[in-house]
Amino acid sequence: MDWFRVHNILTFYLPVLIFVSLVYGFITKNSKMLIYSLGYLVAYFSIRLEIHHYQNKLSLHGDRRFVRALIVLDLFAVGFLLPMVLSYTNRANFIRNIILYLGVGVLIYAMAWKLIEKLTERRLLIISLGLSLVIGMTTGGILEPLIFALLALWTYLVVKHNLVPYAEKNNG
């Protein structure tokens, strides 16, 4: 399999697929799908923003370890945890759930920062696919976990190909 081609296809078509699922959730009035799709869209664009800052060496983004930790945080906290928390939130427990999300998000970042050297690309993909199964079990649908799995695969390829949005084959 040509991983460079898969990387480039996902880079281009993943936001389109997420937007289509967002529109589908809006048309079918499925609020959970809307929340998950918005979370995936925000996670995708936040990862793209981290890559952009890394390539332009803005502030601390020149450090590869820092950017990898932020990408893992974006995938797990914004792509998985935030939609999961918001889809089961109502007016009575909104503040409590947001505070819980912020606490767990800081914990995820601290763990990612501590374990980023041990967290290989393959382990990241396995953990992400496991979280995709959790999403599938909680939502009962197939579209939300499939999109998260594709987002996880794209993140895996971004980390594998040295934090670039579009991969190129090296001729050396």
Image (cartoon, rainbow, N blue to C red):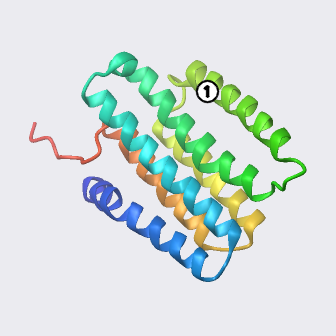
Q: Which residue is painted at 33% across and 30% down in the image?
A: 53
Looking at this view, name the residue that lies furthest to the front: 91
Q: Quadrant of the C terminus?
A: top left
Residue 15 placement: quadrant: bottom left
138 or 92: nearer the viewer: 92
In the rendered image, residue 6, in percent from the top left (x then y), is placed at 32, 59
86 or 126: nearer the viewer: 86
Q: Is residue 15 left or right of residue 149?
A: left
Residue 144 placement: quadrant: bottom right
Q: Which residue is painted at 32% across and 28% down in the image?
A: 54
Q: Give the SS element for disc 1.
A: helix
Q: Is residue 54 left or right of residue 92?
A: left
In the rendered image, residue 44, in percent from the top left (x then y), is placed at 45, 50
- Is 78 situated above or below 62? below
Count residues near mark 1 (Cα–Cα under 10 Å), then give few for <14, some for 14-19, many for 20+: many
Q: Which residue is painted at 68% across and 46% down in the image?
A: 81
Looking at this view, name the residue that lies furthest to the bottom: 28
Looking at this view, name the residue that lies furthest to the left: 171
- Is 154 situated above or below 136? above
- Is 129 situated above or below 22? above
Q: Quadrant of the N terminus?
A: bottom left
**Residue, disc 1:** 109
Q: Which residue is painted at 84% across and 56% down in the image?
A: 90
- Is 109 situated above or below 132? above
Q: Amino acid at mark 1?
A: Tyr
